[in-house]
Image (tube, rainbow, N blue to C red):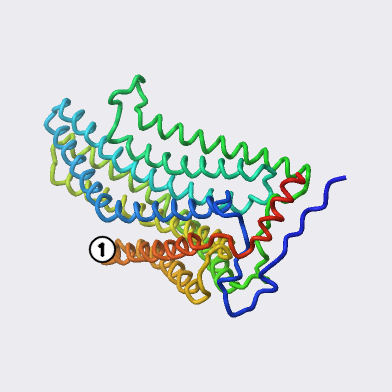
Amino acid sequence: MPATPKSFPDRASSAPAKPALALAPHFAPMSARRLYIFGGIALIAAGLLFGDIFAVFILHQNAALQGEALIAASRAVAAGNAAAVNDVFSHLGNVLEDRGTKVDAHVHMIGAGYLALLLALVQPYIALSRQTKKSLATLFIAGGVFLPVGIFLIHYVGLTGSPFTAIGWASVLADSAGALLILVLIVQAWGFRQYLRSRQLSEPELPALERSGDSMPRRALLTGGTILVLLGFLHGAYYAGTLLYEHERMETEILQRLINAATSGNLDVVTTEVNNFGGLAAARAVNIAAHSHIIEFGLLAMLLSFVQPFVFLSEKWKRRWVKLLLGGSVILPVFVLLELKLGLLAGGIADVGGLMVLVGLVGMLVGILRYSGGLDVENYVESDAAEGAL
């Protein structure tokens, strides 16, 4: 007969209401759960910071280089210079790789952070030893760092010094880090299978929302995150239903006119169509970016709602960081959409929104760093006893 799950004391129900700092449930100092939470938020914050830097200093300049390359290619076509056309498109491919690797690094770093937070939530249901789980957490965070670093370096390292014909050392680093993440997930799945067999928790569960001493920040994050995801889905459905296919048709027509003008030597029309193509690409980009960012921030808010008991801050500061994060989560996608109408002003405000989200994350990160688990040492002892019973 399976053993009855260990009951862990709920300090939140007996602690006084005034000192919010004493309401955090215990988890072992530097445990797997703490590593996942701290590392996950750090990865997300680093990914957002990198995204802001990329948007300000690289993205728009890169788009201008793409337009210049298309104009140069059209002029080479008009002049009948096939070699120049090949050179221009080689340069264009280099520009696109530069942009693509940076976007991928940004996305993969944030994605690894989200996955780390999810793993933190399921740690009580992973029936492995505490040291094994901590080692897996360390490997996962290391993989989450090296994967985007390897992707970022692909453009700069290339095939230099590589023994492979098509894969450079940066790609090897990225692929190895990705394989490491997969390995950790496989072991975690095996640990969950062991839990299903024993039905015994390996550490305390998260406190219920209604019993936690920081319910306002948790409820605000959960409600706000749900609304953000819903708005993101509605915007995506609207764009797909009204604009997406029209933009695809316009893209084909613009490229066809561009080719015809280049072959006929009409360079003025070529310049006009390149500008039209850039405007269409910008319209698609802002809609896709707004759609993805608002859903991304909604998911982030929902995940953060579950880890608020581990943020060792007063109720007042928790509320401040929550308001800052949710405010930035609305400002960024809204002003990304307004970039076509307001230009750089909207882009600057969107960057401020991203900075607000980043500051809110860093504030929570400080709170998690401050929490050592020393307030509930008894729970740590009981967790050891439960582990010994597995």
Between 368 and 377, the one nearer to me in the picture:
377
Image point (38%, 48%), residue name:
106
Q: Residue furthest bottom?
A: 18
Residue 103 at x, y = what percent? 36, 46
The residue most toward the left is 79
Residue 169 coordinates in the image, percent (x, y): 35, 28
| Front-lying residue, 114 or 74 | 114
Q: For residue 19, what is the image quadrant?
A: bottom right
Nearest the viewer among 199 and 350 is 199
In this view, the residue farthest toward the right is: 1
Q: Which residue is mark 1?
A: 343
Task: Give the vertical position of 32 relative to 12 (above or below).
Answer: above
Q: Mark 1: which amino acid?
A: Gly
In the picture, measured across the screen, residue 302 lies left or right of residue 124, that is left
Residue visible at 49% across and 52% down?
40
Q: Position of residue 171 (x, y in %)?
A: 38, 31
SS at mark 1 in the image? loop
**Could you say where residue 115 lies in the image, as x and y percent from the top left?**
53, 48
Disc 1 crowd rating (10 Å Cα; few below 14, some 14-19, many 20+) is few
Quarter holding the N terminus is top right
For the C terminus, which image quadrant?
Answer: top right
Residue in the foreground of this view, choosing between 53 and 65: 53
Q: Residue at x 33, y 23 (%)?
A: 162
